[in-house]
Amino acid sequence: MRRIPFSYALASLLVLALVIWLAFGNFQRFQTTAPDASPRSESGPRVEISVQQSTPFIPQQIIQGQLTAARETTLRANVAGFVAEKPVAQGSRVEEGDTLLVLDNDALPEQLQQAQDELAVAEAEYAGARNLRQRELISQPELLRLQSALSASAASVAQLQKQLDDSRPTAPFDGVLNRVQVELGDLLQPGEEWGQLVNDRRLKGAAWVSQQQVGDLSEGLPVTARLLNGDHLEGELTFISHRAEEATRTFYIEATLDNPAGKRLAGGSAELTITLPPRQVHTLSPALLSLNSEGQLAVKHMDANDQVQQTAVELVSADIQRAYVTGLPDPLRLITLGAGMVDVGEVVTPVPTEEATISQPPSGQDSAHAPVD
């Protein structure tokens, strides 16, 4: 009989030992380990969900605007005359009623005094004529002639007084005499510009907003203007145009801003932040937004019966990390994973996610998004 090689015999013994070890090892594990519980019957596909509560959110609109003085006017001459005095220096602050310029009045004070004396004589003659007329000592036409003379004298006094006032123009409001364009001895003609008065204690922020933005705005909303140097001015929205510009389809708005320090800002640009009324929103990833059959933004979530629902939402604000929407039920069982694999009305198996809510943005990270604590 032929002898089996030692190597073959050794290999056979090793294989036999391995088979016996595997067989008895599995048998022993089944003998010592309790049988697994029967798997829970699932009614549908598994999806990951996050339970959320709505939170207060203060939406903001940030637009680029132009700063102008709240009140400014171009000063023009009402009468002709040579510049006799410049009582206020260019750049000085003035109050309403202060005399800004004096023109050669061409003896207007003396002429005014003469007219006032003639008016006094006409008043005395008319008063005496009325007494005589009551006693029928003069005729009615004579009384009317004296009354006409009285009216003419009063008109002459008023005209000369206005000419005298126009030769001494005064400030129509508090402000800064921003520019004086005449020198002593210059001849001014009626209507000729000679200076500019600016009230820079309050500024006006002007800007244009789109058709989508204007619907959320109303007069009285707080406005913050951020200047190029980082400073801020506070104010409120005071005007919203009722008609869009035809060329751009945008609406003109104005905000009144306080500038108590009188900083030289009129004519510059600023970033206007309009704070809108708070709203209750849900915060979610923009990737969870989809379009429904009507082309509206919608979000898939689950109801109390584990059925998939899709609800149209209004996008309040968004960035690359999160979207703030309204229109969802509260609390919300949001489908965070697997929404694209299930249909509306389908019964699914919810699997809670480890993070129940999406964190709010850190304070100061984004000025356009301002959740309320």
Image (spheres, rainbow, N blue to C red):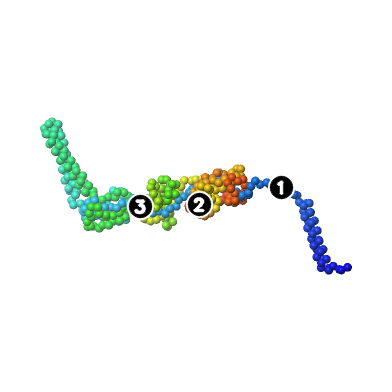
Look at label 1 and name its amino acid.
Answer: Ser
Q: Residue 307 in the image: x percent, y percent?
A: 60, 44
Q: Of all residues shown, which one is farthest toward the right?
A: 1
Could you tell me which quadrant the N terminus lies in? bottom right
Mark 3 or 2: the one toward you: 2
**Alpha carbons under labels 1 and 3: distance apart:** 79 Å
**Alpha carbons under labels 3 and 2: distance apart:** 34 Å
The residue pinned by badge 2 equals: 318
Q: Residue 228 in the image: x percent, y percent?
A: 42, 57
Of residues 69 and 340, the one nearer the viewer is 340
Q: Residue 190 in the image: x percent, y percent?
A: 23, 52
Disc 1 vs disc 3: Cβ atoms closer than 8 Å?
A: no
**Which class describes the residues within 10 Å of circle 2: few (<14), some (14-19), or many (20+)?**
some
Q: Of all residues shown, which one is farthest toward the top?
A: 135
Mark 1 or 2: the one toward you: 1
Regarding mark 3 in the picture, which secondary structure is present there? strand
The residue pinned by badge 1 equals: 38
Look at label 2 and name its amino acid.
Answer: Ala
Q: Residue 266 in the image: x percent, y percent?
A: 36, 54
